[in-house]
Image (tube, rainbow, N blue to C red):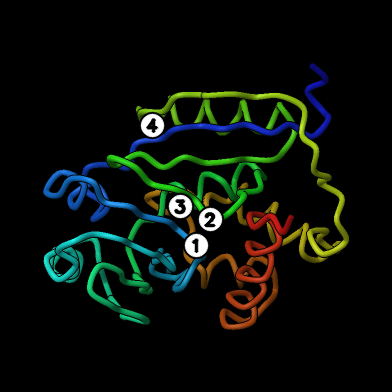
Amino acid sequence: MDTKKPALARIKIKFPDKIWISEIFKKFKDIRMEIINFLPYDLERSIGNALINIIYYDIDSIIKVIQNHDSVYEFNLIEKNENFIKFNVKTKDPYLLYAVIKCGVLVDFPINVKEGYAYWRLISTRDRINNLLNLFEEKKMEYILLKIGNSPYTLEKEENKLNFDELKVLNTAINEGFFEIPREISLENLANKLGKSKSALSVMLRKIIKKKIMLDI
């Protein structure tokens, strides 16, 4: 397999124990969950924002656990009925998101979650997917590579391409350790290094990250 051509990988990865998702799957059985998207919310404080659907017969108990979990900064209910909720949740230390950004891998949303495991479809070159899996191993994250092969999707979509300035910003952020946990450089210091205001850099990074991780098939 050509390691530079687009590859499609399916992986099963366990969420870290400190994350609220792990907690609800420990406490409740037969939950159906779907992560619709997951993007940075507050880059300065390493907070990510996810849009999620959950189906469960005792939905109020699920809400209570999420709202009271230490990893949750904010919970906003968007839609609710007897057995279903759609909500935004803001969580700290979004390591999985940062790992994907660092390795330059596209994620095919939505992501299904079963028994505390996320089932990801990743699109990138074989080299970059291997780098991501190596990163998971370094951090002792539990995962299983279910399948990998040639991708029917292109990585060259115009809307996913970065311009020269965006590439410079992303590469500098990665090289300076902005996407490490714990972070090795602050947003303010990164902005100073790049000659930008902190607010302008924050907006730019959000746009870059959306291009780099969200696959629109």
Q: Quadrant of the N terminus?
A: top right
Q: Which residue is mark 2?
A: 110
Q: Nearer the viewer, mark 4 or mark 2?
A: 2
Q: In 3D space, how far apart are the residues under numbered discs 1 and 2 (Cα atoms)?
A: 4 Å
Q: In 3D space, how far apart are the residues under numbered discs 2 and 3 (Cα atoms)?
A: 30 Å
Q: Which residue is mark 3?
A: 184
Q: In 3D space, how far apart are the residues under numbered discs 1 and 3 (Cα atoms)?
A: 29 Å
Which residue is drawn at the image coordinates 14% and 63% (left, top)? 58
Q: Earlier in the sequence, mark 1 or mark 4?
A: 1
Q: Quadrant of the C terminus?
A: bottom right
Q: In 3D space, how far apart are the residues under numbered discs 4 and 2 (Cα atoms)?
A: 24 Å
Q: Which mark is residue 200?
A: none
Quadrant assignment, res 26: top left
Q: Earlier in the sequence, mark 4 or mark 2?
A: 2
Please provide percent x and percent y for residue 29. 18, 45
Kind of residue sitting beneath label 2: Pro
Q: Earlier in the sequence, mark 1 or mark 3?
A: 1
Q: Earlier in the sequence, mark 2 or mark 3?
A: 2
Please provide percent x and percent y for residue 171. 70, 52
